[in-house]
């Protein structure tokens, strides 16, 4: 019987995303029908449209970052960039484009979890880059005002925490195991100017 907590967490993530995407899609289709029927545009309808689009993008992101990733699955940069654009179009943090190409789904999962970790370091806005080299991936967050929790970032370097992090920071617990699944070695570096997650190829 499977007892791997990382695998169980991924199954739960996939199940939640699967069950939520259908009703969100139904609401989106309903809005399109209203627009096609000539329903008058209003601030209220615009708010619903924006909220549904954001919810749809977040579910798609969570599906990649927290869901099951099989060894033979691949994900393209076009899909990732589409999700990131819809998710962060109006936010203060600028996220540079995902490098072109198709990558193993497990690898993309690790990079997106690293992206969530990087976002924690720039709560007031900043820039996040995801670069790829022969050595692997580097996810880097920079901002005029950094606000990082060193205890969370220590988790990425193998330090055992004294308590579970808040739900909003669960990515710090999941990333090391997700990186291992993708045959990547996870480490982090935190300074006053930047927060970096390195995912080196094993």
Image (cartoon, grey):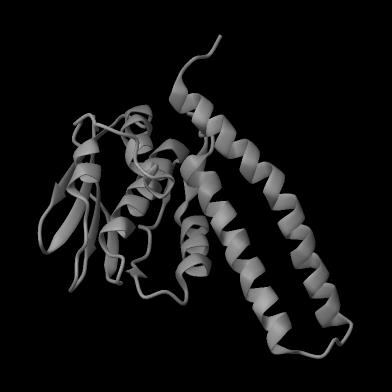
Q: Is residue 193 above or below residue 32?
A: above
| Count of all numbered marks drawn on residues in the image | 0
In the image, 53 versus 111, the foreground residue is 53
On screen, 201 above or below 88?
Answer: above
Q: Position of residue 108 (x, y in %)?
A: 41, 45
Residue 88's spot in the image, x, y percent? 45, 69
Q: Is residue 70 visible?
A: no
**Outermost left residue:** 192
In the displayed structure, does residue 85 sit left or right of residue 97?
right
Check the image and report above or below for 69 versus 101.
Answer: above
Asked if residue 119 can be seen in this view, the reply is yes
Q: Residue furthest front?
A: 163
Residue sitting nearer the eye, 164 or 118: 164
Identity of the residue drawn at 38% across and 45% down: 166
Tell me residue 130's x, y (percent). 30, 56
Q: In the image shown, does 121 or 89 lie closer to the viewer?
A: 121
Choose between 101 and 129: the one closer to the eye.
129
Q: Residue at x 82, y 90 (%)?
A: 40
Residue at left offset 47%, top offset 74%: 89
- Residue 46, image x, y percentages: 68, 82
> What is the quadrant of the N terminus in the image?
top right
- Residue extending farthest to the top is 1
Q: Where does the C terminus fall, quadrant-wise?
A: top left
Residue occupying the far right of the picture = 37
| Left-right relation of 44 to 76 | right
Residue at x 44%, y 27% (from the top left corner): 6
């Amino acid at each position: 019987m499977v007892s791997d907590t990382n695998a169980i967490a991924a199954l739960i993530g996939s199940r939640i995303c699967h069950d939520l995407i259908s009703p969100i899609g139904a609401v989106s289709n309903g809005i399109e029908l209203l627009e096609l029927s000539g329903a008058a545009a209003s601030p209220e309808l615009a708010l619903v449209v924006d909220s549904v689009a954001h919810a749809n993008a977040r579910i798609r992101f969570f599906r990649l970052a927290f869901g099951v990733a099989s060894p033979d699955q691949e994900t393209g940069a076009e899909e990732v960039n589409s999700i990131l654009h819809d998710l962060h179009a109006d936010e203060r943090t600028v996220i540079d484009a995902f490098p072109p190409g198709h990558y193993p789904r497990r690898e993309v999962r690790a990079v997106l979890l690293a992206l969530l970790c990087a976002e924690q370091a720039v709560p007031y806005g900043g820039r996040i880059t995801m670069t790829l080299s022969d050595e692997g991936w580097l996810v880097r967050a920079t901002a005029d005002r950094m606000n990082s929790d060193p205890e969370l970032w220590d988790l990425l370097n193998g330090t055992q925490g004294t308590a579970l992090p808040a739900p909003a920071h669960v990515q710090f617990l999941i990333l090391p195991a997700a990186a291992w699944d993708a045959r990547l070695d996870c480490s982090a570096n935190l300074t006053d100017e930047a927060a970096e997650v390195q995912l080196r190829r094993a």
